[in-house]
Image (cartoon, coloured by chain):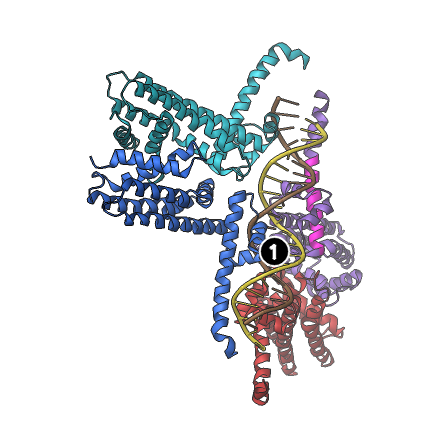
Chain colours: A blue, B cyan, C purple, D red, E yellow, F brown
Amino acid sequence: MGSEVSTGAGRKARGRDERRQAILDGAFAVFARRGYAQTCVQEVAQEAGVAKPTVYNHLADKESLYREAVEAAADRVGARSLAVVEGLREVAPDADLREGLRAAGRGLLQACHDEEARAVHRLASAEAARFPDLETSARERTALRIRSALADRLARLVLAGRLRPCEPELAAEHFLALLTGPLVYRPDAEPDALARAAAEVFLRAYGPG
Amino acid sequence: MGSEVSTGAGRKARGRDERRQAILDGAFAVFARRGYAQTCVQEVAQEAGVAKPTVYNHLADKESLYREAVEAAADRVGARSLAVVEGLREVAPDADLREGLRAAGRGLLQACHDEEARAVHRLASAEAARFPDLETSARERTALRIRSALADRLARLVLAGRLRPCEPELAAEHFLALLTGPLVYRPDAEPDALARAAAEVFLRAYGPG
Amino acid sequence: MGSEVSTGAGRKARGRDERRQAILDGAFAVFARRGYAQTCVQEVAQEAGVAKPTVYNHLADKESLYREAVEAAADRVGARSLAVVEGLREVAPDADLREGLRAAGRGLLQACHDEEARAVHRLASAEAARFPDLETSARERTALRIRSALADRLARLVLAGRLRPCEPELAAEHFLALLTGPLVYRPDAEPDALARAAAEVFLRAYGPG
Amino acid sequence: MGSEVSTGAGRKARGRDERRQAILDGAFAVFARRGYAQTCVQEVAQEAGVAKPTVYNHLADKESLYREAVEAAADRVGARSLAVVEGLREVAPDADLREGLRAAGRGLLQACHDEEARAVHRLASAEAARFPDLETSARERTALRIRSALADRLARLVLAGRLRPCEPELAAEHFLALLTGPLVYRPDAEPDALARAAAEVFLRAYGPG
DNA sequence: GATGAATGAGCCTTCATTCAT
DNA sequence: AATGAATGAAGGCTCATTCAT
């Protein structure tokens, strides 16, 4: 008895959470592949390596499964993207701002336009009829967090005299729009070219007078 | 049968196309409300005021129904948007360009971000798994046509010396991105404010040196 | 076209009702054999010779199926029993009343304690948790109708001086209780013996002074 | 393990039986509320305050649980009813027989038509398909024991000249039928009124010539 | 002995699609 | 051409039961 107390409890708790994670990860993968309705819980269970009822042991029903899987993925995307934006802190006072924005742009394209990020947005908006608030929830976990963090960085750059005075939130929206907007027309555009063009145009519009 | 050929054929043909239209319109409405899987053919039939097998008389199956309904709607959206862009032709050589861009922006927001347009994009991307080419098809009928027409206008403005030399396609993408990008963060933003900001920033970046 | 109008419409209507009847009959048979939960709709469909969805085309769900099947059977039992009680009308003023009651008793045992009747009561009370009012509904269609009709007959016999003055409803309950009560202890008792004993005892208690 | 043998065995045995009782009582309560199929073992476990596998440690499976719970309750009902019938022993040779029967009738209605007793009969007959002998088993533990005991009392009353010669078993059946039969038609009838009417009619039929 | 977690099996229900009229 | 009715196929969910602790 005593020999299992310390690790036993730990293993149990850890095991349960790990299994839940595995189920959510499997669910996101299958939902991304097939969409909500095409996905059957059976397939999610297979992907997670558990039996079907085990899925229901952790998530109440297929809808919860979807919602939680999408939100968890949205959190991952948001976290990745935030880390990239934080990189802008390190732009030295005399460093090349254009280069810093371009690097941030490249990073953001990787972080918030990779396969997972696009799946998050697609899954969130696709089932807006069934989950009226999922789109908003996903947006808060990704786009809004990113804009907010980026606006913080831009505000500092304004104070440092490296950008002209402006509304930081709007400027952030514009930078992100310039960066990702073209993907609508050219989904396979080179990230580096996109980042360069976005930085260039952004600085012409928002650079110091 | 034979007795109806002369008038009957005419009536039938016209009635047939009208009925087909009614079915496609009903289908788009229901698909937009419920999504692909939630929609049952029965409901489409009701919305169109016909019986279920009649739907199958006009469209082979549910998938055709979806595809054709979405593509027809995409064509409508594209046509509306093109008309707006064509309005830029009328910007007189000495007129206020900023105001012209702003007006075009307002019109585009109405034309390509109204309920129907957003439904088209949502429906096209939501079922990417089932219709791998529908997203591309819808994009061609809407976004690409718009960009192309807008690029034409911008090229003329460059030639007229009212914009700095640039790649017209990229500039068009940037204008559209500046215009609609903020909607990701503020879905209920005022169209006029969006158009003004987009025109302003676009001209700072692309206006004559 | 014209040649099918008269029979076609009839056939359609008749066909639909007949099919519904077949489904309800099949359902009652299977429910009586297996009980509510053991019965799967598939088996009901087989018994009725239709496909499973056809069952759902006629009855909304398994619960409706149960309720309607039980109530239809209750109506049949009630109708059969009423016919037997009506037979008491024909007891001539100078005929042997004991013999008339005995014959009615035999008939009632056949009509309201045959396989079907017992199944009705069992099915109605077994699922009282799921169908809180089914037991009452079945009782109204069977027992209460029978008591009422029998009370009518007994009242006439009182007026004719062949029974002592009494409350006809209570007397009817007592006759029916004497008739069927012993079945609780001897489910296989001879109907004729039961009827004779019930008539005998009833007349000792309710016969003219 | 070894260290608990002396006291542990005693405690365990007592605790074990008590726990078994708690489980059977909980099972009966839940089965009576929900019926066999609606009841899940989980709910029985909750009602008994134990975990689900503990139920399986005491009873082999859900069917045993049902059978044993119903039979235990039937034994309780039978015991209560017998005690009431035994009360008839005390009718003094010169006491009011009508009053004695009426008192016994009231007592029997309490003992064998209370909530528990009706649940026993309902549960036993409801699952006749699954437990072909449970109905008989329950009847033996309740109705047949009661009839037998009552027949004993009636036989003595015949010998004492207070009832006319008759078959005691049949007379007992008739008394019980007169007593409880009307409940079929009036489930909420006053027990006292029922008992009075039953005693009255019974004595008219079975009282001394 | 008691429990948390996992599973195998089964059933209700829905719906796209096809016949017969 | 249009419809009422029927069906084949598929999937979500529940639950009795069993391991591992």
In this view, the residue farthest toward the bottom is D6
Q: Is the residue B10 above or below the residue D22 in the image? A: above
Along the line of sight, the residue nearer the viewer: D138 or D81: D138
Along the line of sight, the residue nearer the viewer: C38 or A38: A38
Image coords of residue D102 (percent x, y): 61, 73
**If the image is split into quadrants, where does the C terminus of chain A sit?**
top left
Residue C31 on the magenta span: yes
Q: Quadrant of residue B91?
A: top left
Q: Give the residue drawn at x 35%, y 37%.
A: A196
Along the line of sight, the residue nearer the viewer: B180 or B72: B180
Question: Within 10 Å of the Cα at label 1, are there few (<14), some (14-19), or many (20+) other Cα atoms?
Answer: many
Along the line of sight, the residue nearer the viewer: D61 or D135: D61
Image coords of residue D138 (percent x, y): 68, 69
Q: Give the residue drawn at x 53%, y 69%.
A: D47
Image coords of residue C150 (percent x, y): 68, 54
Taken as a whole, is the magenta stretch helix, strand or loop?
helix
Residue range (magenta): C15-33
